[in-house]
Image (cartoon, helix red, strand yellow):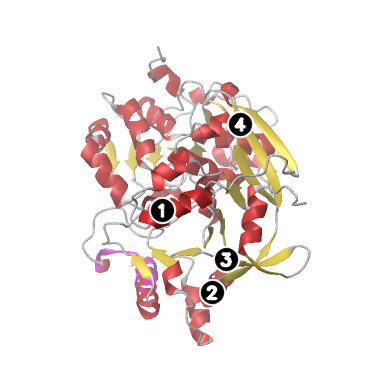
Amino acid sequence: MTMPKTLYEKLIDQHCVTRIDADHVLLYVDFHIMNEYTSPQAFAGLHSAARPVRRAGAHLAVIDHVNPTRPITDLSQIADSGGRLQIETLGQNCARHGIELFDLFDPRQGIEHVVVPENGFAWPGMVIACGDSHTTTYGAFGALAYGIGTSEIEHVLATQTLVYRVLAPMQVRIDGALPLGVSAKDIVMAFVKDVGAAGASGYAVEFTGSTVAALSVEARMTLCNMAVEAGARAALIAPDATVFNYLQGRPHAPKGADWEAACVDWQTLQSDPDARFAKTVTIDASTIAPLVTWGTSPDQSVPITGCVPEQADARALDYMGLHAGQQLTDITIDRAFIGSCTNARIEDLRRAATILRGRRVAGGVTALVVPGSKQVRAMAEDEGLDRIFKDAGFEWRGAGCSMCLAMNDDVIPEGERCASSTNRNFEGRQGRGARTHLMSPEMVAAAAVTGTLTDVRTMMDPAP
């Protein structure tokens, strides 16, 4: 009799080349993504050992971390010589090995975790690896996806396999209707807050429940993207018709008879009804309010109507320039940023634009919106969203990681405070001494308009 299995366990079994020991397997990797920041040393190691890339067609390279988001016409205009060298080196390595590259002047360029889904590279049932921790994003498609280090990048380039430590499956069941002003960003922030920054360490999370089933694919990507902030090395959502509809017709999705066969296969990618999870977390979505971080870890958040906790971490308070008991809506901001692999897709921009239409950014606030890809940027411009952002006083930029991690020239000055739609609020994440408050894109828009952390629900019309 076959033992019931979780979706995670099925994906491990389907990709296991061999079992190494009780905890480790050699895992076949269907697709690998690289960026200019984490790949140079891996290629150098490959070259020093005189090894070729085993399957060039199973890799994609994207420039996104260090590139400027202001317009340039050639690489010589990049002021940062180190960043320019990283971009040039990636181009040379890809040309040497025949790996497809979305360079800065490619119309498909953008943040890796935005361009991979929109071009149809991520399919249900895949194992996907990338030298970036937010690779968990592709779990929204029912793919086992995770971040890897430089030595692992070299290994997957050379062998198309990775040594993998098997995780314990965790079910996160989310049910209930989302209240006004609450989005996927608030759901995942609530999860991270509830379990803590290490609460999912050692686990592969599977998000289930009626709330998750009702989410769009883009919202599901937000959920899986930030699961890593609770320590999860994998996050999954079983694929369904919503995913199939999203993928159909995309450039690298299966076509014709292959598409029909794929859909039949993908429908089997579900946890068995009697599958056993090592841990189950339940969340009532109807109780979630728009959340904002107050500290220097993504799990340090409270509802926008709340206060900085009385027992708040002293170091975090000192860094953030706050005090216990302080009302969040009394906190003023200097910057507003909408972007990142978490919240720079077209749906994110649409929601933020709804709040900004007919309103202006508050005096003294510098506001920036960085679409997740050139394709997202073009879609937004076709819909007139760029005009809404610019009329409101936001700068409208090109695609890239930008101010999420301040590796280009989009840096928050020391001591300034930013309302940010990004995924991490660590010390120095957006610039040395920068103070980051994480929230949804629509909450960032509300803060930009008022100049303070603001409950976006006060700017929204209640549903009839």
Instruction: Identify the disc placed on residue 154.
Output: 2
Which one is earlier in the sequence, the residue at label 3 or at label 2? 3
Give the residues in magenta: 76-90
Q: Residues within 10 Å of mark 3 (few under 14, many from 20)?
A: some
Could you tell me which secondary element the residue under label 3 belongs to?
Answer: loop
**Kind of residue at disc 3:** Gly
**Kind of residue at disc 2:** Glu
Which one is earlier in the sequence, the residue at label 1 or at label 3? 3
Q: CA distance from mark 1 to mark 4?
A: 30 Å
Q: Residues within 10 Å of mark 2 (few under 14, many from 20)?
A: many
Q: Look at mark 4 in the image and give the residue it sits on.
A: 174
Q: Look at mark 1 in the image and give the residue it sits on.
A: 259
- Is residue 309 in view from this perspective? yes
Mark nearest the camera among 3 and 4 is: 4
- The answer to whether mark 2 and mark 4 are in CB contact below 8 A is no
Q: Quadrant of residue 251?
A: bottom left
Q: Look at mark 3 in the image and give the residue it sits on.
A: 149
Mark nearest the camera among 3 and 2 is: 2
Could you tell me which secondary element the residue under label 4 belongs to?
Answer: strand
Q: Which residue is at 73% across, 70% downward? A: 20
Given the current orientation, which residue lies at the most extreme top position? 464
